[in-house]
Image: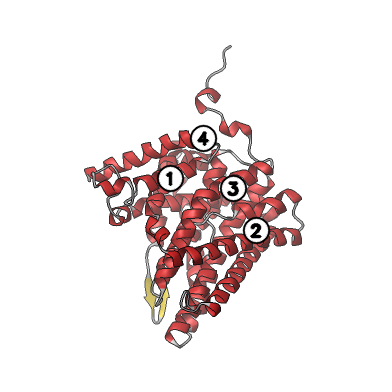
Amino acid sequence: METYLILLAVCLIGGLMLSRITKLINLPAVTAYLVAGLILGPFLLGALNVPGLGFNSMEQVEGLKIITQTALGFIAFTIGNEFRLSQLKATGGKAIFIGIAQAVLTTALVDIVLIALHLFFPHILSLPAAITLGAIASATAPAATLMVVRQYKADGPLTRLLLLVVAIDDAVGLLLFSASFGIATALSAGHVSVLAVVAEPIIEIVLSLALGSLMGLALHLVEQFFHSRSKRMAVSVAFVLLTVGLSSIKFQIGPVHCGFSLLLVCMMTGTIFCNICSTSEELMGRIDGWTMPLNILFFVISGAELDLQVLAQPMTLIVGALYILSRSAGKYFGAEASCKLTKCSHNITANLGITLLPQAGVALGMAATASTLADGAIVRNVVLFSVLVYELVGPALTKMALTRAGEIDPEGRTSARTHNKPKQA
């Protein structure tokens, strides 16, 4: 236990210190946290096998999965705050259309490119792997996007639409992946399972939304028993932890495998709570401050999870490069086309696609599921390589797009020590 406590302290301090360096070159703090994780990971400092100095093995990184899952739950809960009825009435229709359209177009484009690669070089990539990678390409990382928005206090039409689209993107990505992976499994096994392709993904989404709604209502009922701000915040934290735990439960009803999506459950919890609790805005602000160290640990541990060994595999680099290029084109042009169809402003049309590039936890989870395919290793390695690239450059591109759109306030880069200093009378 003492090793893990020392390691967590090193992760926090290392990430924070490195963020001072990235600030000098105008990079988002989230990039610093990810790089700190890479440095502390099992391929660099961790390889020295000094207890507490870094992650000595991938098993040690996996041992902290409870922290990354919890942080992801809080991030999703916070994103649920964006689904207020007033906000949905203004941009909800556009967000739903854009979220679905850009995800489907991205999957289609990546499928076309990788299936073409399979037809010309079948020994490099199988058809099931190509189809699976196409679906994984639809996923966008909400955590990196939210951290950039928070750090620079970004606000405006693009930022508000972005957070809605990223949330919707996860539900669409889950459906696309479940269907594509079912088809890929069928191609490998020689028979199609309607349950795996159609029923199970829909059941997972329905169950997730139902559980999230129930938890949001329960949170509102319980927090009314308390009037102290600190106690109400403690109740909210307890409910998010409970929601994360319940989201991990899997069960089977007859031939149907049932489970929950952590992101969807926690987002729905936040959505219901924020729409029925009159003081939710203030409470959300307090929770954001409480979870900052947890979010830093999430990104440092995520950086440590990135496997640098994939850089030594030529086939992975070739397929990975095609995957990254086609996915980036799909996200950018898919968002641009759907924005034009919904008559969004030029600022949103020109910049939204760039902000949708980050990819991390959700994609890695999908890749872990896809590892059961005959050549699931290539899927996992390609996703690891793409996450390595996207997580290092994605936050900077998101910041650039939001700055270009005029939605990053320069005050977001001021010193809190100076900014919060009491004025002289």
Secondary element at tag 4 = helix
**Within 10 Å of the Cα at label 3, are there few (<14), some (14-19), or many (20+) other Cα atoms?**
many
The residue to which callout 3 is attached is 398
Label 1 to label 4, Cα distance in Å? 13 Å
Please indicate, yes or no, whether residue 134 appears anywhere in the rendered image: yes
Marks 2/4: CA–CA distance = 27 Å
Contact check, label 3 and label 2, Cβ < 8 Å: no
Q: Are circles 2 and 1 on residues that touch, CB within 8 Å?
A: no
Residue name at image x 71 percent, y 52 percent: 350
Give the quadrant of residue 290: top left
User: Distance between the Cα atoms at labels 2 and 1?
Assistant: 26 Å
If you read the primary sequence from the N terminus, does the residue marked by circle 1 or circle 4 appear first?
Answer: 4
User: What residue did someone put label 4 on?
Assistant: 23
**Dot label at residue 332:** 2
**Is disc 1 in contact with disc 4, using a CB cutoff of under 8 Å?**
no
**Whole-percent x and y of residue 110?**
58, 69
Task: Compare marks 2 and 4 and give the one earlier in the sequence.
Answer: 4
